[in-house]
Amino acid sequence: GNSVTQMEGPVTLSEEAFLTINCTYTATGYPSLFWYVQYPGEGLQLLLKATKADDKGSNKGFEATYRKETTSFHLEKGSVQVSDSAVYFCALRDSSYKLIFGSGTRLLVRP
Amino acid sequence: ETGVTQTPRHLVMGMTNKKSLKCEQHLGHNAMYWYKQSAKKPLELMFVYSLEERVENNSVPSRFSPECPNSSHLFLHLHTLQPEDSALYLCASSQDGASYTGELFFGEGSRLTVL
């Protein structure tokens, strides 16, 4: 079945460091891929998305590229801020009602 | 301002109580969802409604009863819950075409504590 695997957290970085959160997926078709972010005490917000191979999603300095050959959708940001501290979820949707999430990666950015 | 509004944000109830969670979407979407988020567990899809018809019931215990009176409103009726049902309940909506490639829009969640 379809699934999403994310790197274990927490990830702890200093402000202005480079961020990578790895995400790989398994799907039978050609899924759409998403990154969601959850700040403390809040719901999930869509951060970025990509709907086909080689698409790059970007928002608020975050980027992720849909790599079909490696079945990956890694999240990157060149310079993180304290305000980026949150839990990040990779997700896929493969011609179905279901949005399938990874387990989430907690990011803590220290001043 | 969020396009998906959930009330109440926090709810504490005893095991014998009956309560309801409410969700309203202001986005004109045609599908609505309930997810459960427990500590240290993946997000669990509970129910999906498309055009007000239930299309997914993901082996959820009968003490959870969903209701979708129209495309903008979704309820989750709760009765005789267990302490392990304590979690954040997230409502979401989407505008789905034939290919289901779009994103879901989530509310802020209702934090439920069962004593």
Image (cartoon, rainbow, N blue to C red):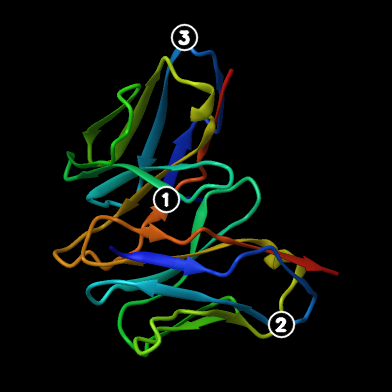
Give me the disc on residue B3: 1
Instruction: Tell which residue pokes out farthest to the top in this image.
Output: B16
Marks 1 and 3 sit apart, C-alpha to C-alpha, by 33 Å
Identify residue type, mark 2: Ser
Asked where in the image residue A85 lies, by quadrant, the reply is bottom right
**Amino acid type of the residue that numbered disc 1 sits on in the rendered structure:** Gly
Q: Quadrant of the C terminus of chain B?
A: top right
How many marks the image carries: the answer is 3
For label 3, the residue is: B16
First in sequence, mark 1 or 3: give its number: 1
**Label 2 SS:** loop
For marks 2 and 3, give the CA distance.
50 Å
On whether disc 2 and disc 1 are found on a single subunit, the reply is no
Quarter of the rendering containing residue A28: bottom left
Q: Do tag 2 and tag 1 residues touch (Cβ < 8 Å)? A: no
Mark 1 or 3: the one toward you: 3
Question: x, y percentage for residue B56?
Answer: 22, 43
- Chain bearing tag 2 is A
User: Is label 2 on the same chain as label 3?
Assistant: no
Asked whether the beta carbons under mark 1 and mark 3 sit within 8 Å of each other, the answer is no
In the rendered structure, the answer to whether residue B84 lies left or right of residue A31 reads: right
Q: Residue at x 53, y 82 (%)?
A: A63
Write down the residue under mark 2: A79
